[in-house]
């Protein structure tokens, strides 16, 4: 059985098509719709990496829609 509090467990930082991040234990198969980013480490290291990398929590589809709406309004990117 998997125990996520095991200090020996290595994690991968994973991302989906909406550019949302998560961490996933290397001993498990990455779920459908997610892919590894190339960063791996302890749980703490991976969480720190996600905190530093994922600075805009809005899904990609929302960011794209908002950028399109801003361009239609003539306001340009924000």
Image (cartoon, rainbow, N blue to C red):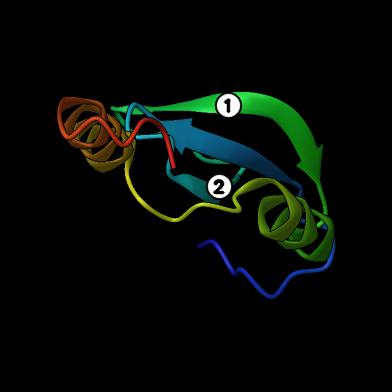
- Residue 35, image x, y percentages: 48, 24
- Residue 29, image x, y percentages: 46, 32
Rendered image quadrant of residue 20:
top left
Q: At 50% across and 62% down in the image, what residue appears?
A: 1
Task: Classify mark 1: residues with Cα within 10 Å, few (<14), some (14-19) or many (20+).
Answer: some
Q: At 24% across and 42% down in the image, what residue appears?
A: 62
Q: Which residue is mark 2?
A: 24
- Residue 76, image x, y percentages: 36, 30
Q: Are marks 2 and 1 in contact (CB under 8 Å)?
A: yes
Query: 60 or 11, which is in the foreground?
Result: 60
Task: Left or right? Give the position of 5 relative to 21.
Answer: right
Q: At 55% across and 47% down in the image, what residue appears?
A: 24
Disc with the residue nearer the chain's start (2 vs 1) = 2
Query: 35 or 28, which is in the foreground?
Result: 35
Q: Which residue is mark 1?
A: 36
Residue 10: image tag:
none
In the rendered image, the quadrant that contains the C terminus is: top left
Task: Left or right? Give the position of 56 relative to 76.
Answer: right
- Which element carries disc 2, helix, strand or loop? strand
- One can see residue 51 in this view: yes
Query: 73 or 28, which is in the foreground?
Result: 73
Task: Left or right? Give the position of 69 relative to 28.
Answer: left
Query: 38 or 72, which is in the foreground?
Result: 72
Task: Classify mark 2: residues with Cα within 10 Å, few (<14), some (14-19) or many (20+).
Answer: many
- Residue 31, image x, y percentages: 35, 34
Distance between mark 2 and mark 1 Cα atoms: 9 Å
Q: At 63% across and 41% down in the image, what residue appears?
A: 13
């Amino acid at each position: 059985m998997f125990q996520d509090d095991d200090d020996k467990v290595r994690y991968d930082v994973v991302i989906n098509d909406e550019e949302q991040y998560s961490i996933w234990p290397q001993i498990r198969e990455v779920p459908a719709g997610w892919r590894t980013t190339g960063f791996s480490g302890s749980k703490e290291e991976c969480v720190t990496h996600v905190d530093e990398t994922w600075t805009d929590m809005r899904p990609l589809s929302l960011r794209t829609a908002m950028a399109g709406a801003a361009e239609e309004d003539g306001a340009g990117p924000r």
